[in-house]
Amino acid sequence: MMAKKKLAIMLLASLVLILFIANVVTRAPIMEVEKDTYSFASAPAQETKKPELRLSMMVTATVMAPEAVMFEGGSWFKSRKMGHSAILLCHPDALLMFDTGLGRDIDQQFKAMPFYLKPLFSYEILKPATEQLDIESFCPGRKLQIALSHLHWDHASGIEDFKGAPVWTPAEELSSGRNSGNKAGYLGNQFDSSDIQWKPLDFKKQNYENYKNSLDFFGDGSVIFVPMGGHTKGSAGMFVNFADGRRFFFTGDTSWSLEGFARPAHKHALMRKIVDGNVSETEQELRRVHALMQLYPDLHVIPAHDYNAYVPAAIYPDYLVNN
């Protein structure tokens, strides 16, 4: 038993050393973004008033990680909590869930993860969304719809827990999920049921902020999806606009930390090599969101896994509501 413990400690120490060396040798600084780098377009005027919304962040699992893993320039001696969460939005037309967090079958699903990646993607389950969500309390009378930032294992795990709910994702993301294999961060056993009602998240040629394409999901300006290429081919971000002027931007895995946009900075070299499909396009998105943050200091930018960026008053079952 002692020998096994010593071996585990040696393996962990070796992994940390490798990560540290890679962080120093392969760092890829991102040049400061000028404010006029991207052209901005105002959202189309809405004839109707934005509806009352409820917004909540449901944490299904967490993991502690060195800050330096989340963004280049972070400390190896500071641990940060990372969340696996589902974003809930109660709209008059539907209950929208953006990503599902880790589902009730994650332990079985995770067995398909390549063995050499498992130590890098550990998790501590709290409670899956299907066991936390009380629709009649949070969003009575509305039917659930699911939209995804992308189909990686830690965002799509709970899809099959919600049978009958339509699932919105760009066609190219669904194709990647079905054809890329487990090495690319997808676990096909999470979304292989023939009962899933897939819906294409089709972006229109409509400028929104500094994005050339967008989709006004409900048609009232309250929820706007934009394409965020790089991490995966079909990644999507979601703007939520309250009638009282508060705005939120959920950015999926383009960055694992708010610092990744604020500096801006990449993920750790090894992690971006594993998880970012196109590093150059990911950098473009980091710079784009950085420019947004410069222009709109009050915009709440929320990377999917940065627990520090979550809004404490909106951790489920608590929620924010229009004033």
Image (spheres, rainbow, N blue to C red):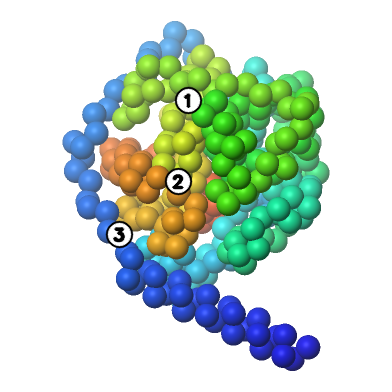
Q: Quadrant of residue 229?
A: top left
Q: Earlier in the sequence, mark 3 or mark 1?
A: 3
Residue 86: assigned label: none
Residue 301 visible at all? no
Amino acid type indicated by mark 3: Ala
What residue is rendered at 49% in x and 46% in y?
Answer: 253
Q: Is mark 2 on a helix, strand or loop?
A: loop
Which of labels 3 and 1 is toward the front? 3
What residue is rendered at 66% in x and 88% in y?
Answer: 6
Q: Quadrant where the N terminus lies?
A: bottom right
Q: What element carries label 3?
A: loop
The correct choice, above or below, for 231 with respect to 170 in the image is below
The correct choice, above or below, for 27 with respect to 94 in the image is below
What residue is rendered at 73% in x and 27% in y?
Answer: 196
Residue 146 % position (x, y): 65, 30
Neighbourhood count class around disc 1 (C-alpha, 10 Å): few under 14, some 14–19, many 20 upward = many
Amino acid type indicated by mark 2: Gly
Residue 277: assigned label: 2
Q: Is mark 1 on a helix, strand or loop?
A: strand
Kindly indicate whether the residue at mark 1 contacts the one at mark 3 (C-beta within 8 angstroms). no
Residue 183 % position (x, y): 58, 52
Q: Name the residue under label 3.
A: 28
The correct choice, above or below, for 63 with respect to 313 in the image is below
Kindly indicate whether the residue at mark 2 contacts the one at mark 3 (C-beta within 8 angstroms). no
Residue 275 % position (x, y): 49, 52
Q: Which of marks 2 and 1 is nearer the N terminus?
A: 1
Amino acid type indicated by mark 1: Ile
48 left or right of 21 in image: right
Q: Nearer the viewer, residue 22 or 284?
A: 22
Alpha-carbon distance for marks 3 and 1?
Answer: 31 Å
Q: Name the residue under label 1.
A: 224
Neighbourhood count class around disc 3 (C-alpha, 10 Å): few under 14, some 14–19, many 20 upward = some
